[in-house]
Amino acid sequence: MRRYSAFAIAREAMRHHLGWERAWKSPAPKSRYDVIIVGAGGHGLATAYYLGKNHGIRNVAVIEKGWLGGGNTGRNTTIIRSNYLQDPSAAIYEKARSLYETLSQDLNYNVMFSPRGVMMLAQTEHEIRGYQRTAHANALQGVTTEFISRARVKELCPIINIDGPRYPVLGALWQPRGGTARHDAVAWGYARACSDMGMDIIQQTEVTGVKREGGRVVGVETTKGDIDCDKLGIVVAGHSGVMAERAGFRLPIESVALQALVSEPIKPIMDVVVMANTVHGYMSQSDKGEMVIGGGADNYNNYTQRGSFQHVEETVRALIETFPIISRLKMLRWWGGIVDMTGDRSPIISKTPVDGVFVNCGWGTGGFKAIPGSGWAMAELMAKGHSPLADAFSLGRFREGRFIDESVAAGVAH
Amino acid sequence: MLTFQCPYCGVQACETELAAGGEAHLKRFGPGSSDDDFEGYLFLRPNVKGVHFERWRHAMGCGKWFLAARCTATLEVFGTYPAQTTEPPADIIAAIKASRPDWSLT
C-alpha cells in the first residue's frame, strides 16, 4: 500500500494524479478463512482491523450485503463523546474516543477527527441534577467532563437562546475533547488498512445461512457460495435479529428507525456540538457548512430506513426555539437508519449459544462514537475468548439482571 | 405515515394518534417458571423482517389497546383486531396470504 502524505500529493500533482491506487481490493472469496466478519460497517471493519493489528489474525474476510459503510456508518450524525454514567459504558466509549484522537495517524487515513467539544444542555431541574451526577461519575472514571453555567454555554455557543420561553438553558454537561469525525472516512480508513493486511473485503454478498456442526459454527452460506470458517463475528446492527435467526438463536433486540437531516450549507455559526435532550434535538455544523440535525427514534419495529414526518417537525420545532437563527434555513436531505435497540440501551459484545459465533450489536442510537473501542473489544473477545472491555456487555446480563442502564444518562434519542 | 383502523371506535388513526406496544401474542411466564422461559418472555424477540403481529394503543382516541398485523419491511398494514384474542383471526391470516403467498404462521 502506498502511504498517503503531503509528499504523495505533490508527487501525484506532478504526474496528473495517475499514480493513486485503489484504497482496498475487491477479491473473490476464498473457500476458507480463520475468521469471517459479517457486516462491513465501522464496527465490523474495526473488529477485523484490531484482529490483525493486536492479535495477528489476518486470514479474515469481511462480508457485506450492500456496500461498505452504507448502513448506519453512513447515516449517523458523526458525534463522538464518552460522558456516560455507568462504569462499563464510560470505559468502552472513552477507549473509543481516545483511539479516535490518533486514528488518522494509525490508519494513515484522514478521518477528520475534530475534538470541538460536546455540550449537553440541562433545561430542567432534573437534568441539572442528572448531569451533575454524570460529571461526578466521569471524574471517578477518568473521563474529562464538567458541569458548566448557562453564561459559559452562551460564551461557547453564542447562537443559543438561553432564555427560551418553555425550556430555558440552565447549564450544560461539557466534554471538551468530544466532537465529530468524518463518518465515511472511518469506514474507508479501516477498510484500506484491513485490505493492506491481506484481509478480503467482499461487498455485494449476502450471508444467507450459518453452517453448524454439533453446536459449533463451521462456515457460512452466501450468495457467492459456501465459505468455511473457524469463528464468525456478526456485526450487522439493525439486521442482527435476522442474522441471529439464521444462526439459530434469538437476541434481546428490536430494530427501529432513527432519522437525521441536514440543512443547506451556510457560513460557520457554531463550533461545538449541542445536544438538547429534553426537547429532543441535537445539532452540529459539518465542515461543508451544513447543519447536521439528529431526530428521535420511532417506537415501532421497522426495517425501511425511512423517517416519520412528525419526528422531523418535533425536532425542528425544538431546535428553532433553542437556535432562533436557523428558523429560515432550508433542509437539504433527510434519511433514516435502522438501529438495534436493547432493553437497557447498552450494546452487546458477546459469545452466543453457538460455539465460535460472536455478536457485536445493540449499539442502538449511539454506535458511531464507539467504533474503535467496539472493534478493539470484539477483536480481543474473538481472539482470546475474553475481553475486559466487553465482559459487562455479555448476552447473559439480561438473564441475570445485570443491566447497564443508560436509558436516562445516554442521550436524546432513547 | 402509518395508519391503522381502530377496531373499537372505527376511526382511521395515524401513528401520531397511537402508541406502539411491541410484539403481540407473547406467552407469559411468571413466578416458578424456568430462567430460560422467563428470559425469553421478558427480553428475547424474533424481531422479524416481514409480517409482524404487534400491540398498539389508540392513545389519543378511545384509549384502548388493539392488535395489528403489519410488514416491518414495507410498512404495509394487513389489518387490526381486538386485543382480546390469543391468536391472529382467520380474516387477518387470509389478508396476509393474499399478498404474501409464501408466508405461514410459525
Image (tube, coloured by chain):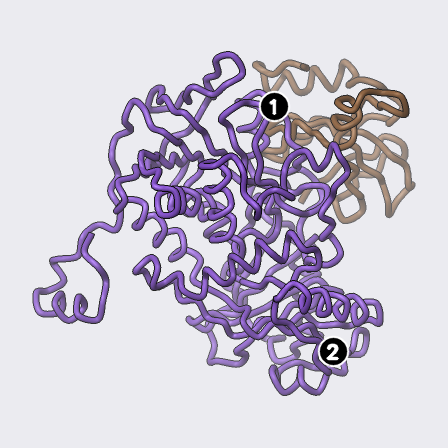
Chain colours: A purple, B brown
Residue type for callout 1: Phe
Chain ID for label 2? A
Q: Position of residue A395 (x, y in %)?
A: 65, 35
**Would residue A206 be found to the left or right of residue A124 on screen?**
left
Lower position in the chain sequence, tag 2 or tag 1? 2
Foreground residue among B71 and B21: B21
Q: Which mark is residue B92?
A: none
- Tell me where residue A171 sits by quadrant: bottom right
Image vertical order of residue A236 relative to residue A145, above or below:
above
Q: Residue at x 62, y 45 (%)?
A: A347
Residue holding disc 2:
A171
Label 2 with label 1: CB-CB less than 8 Å: no
Q: Position of residue A394 (x, y in %)?
A: 63, 38
Residue holding disc 1:
A249
Residue type for callout 2: Gly
Chain ID for label 1? A
Q: Residue at x 32, y 38 (%)?
A: A58
Helix or strand or loop: what does disc 1 sit on?
A: loop
Quadrant occupied by the C terminus of chain B: top right
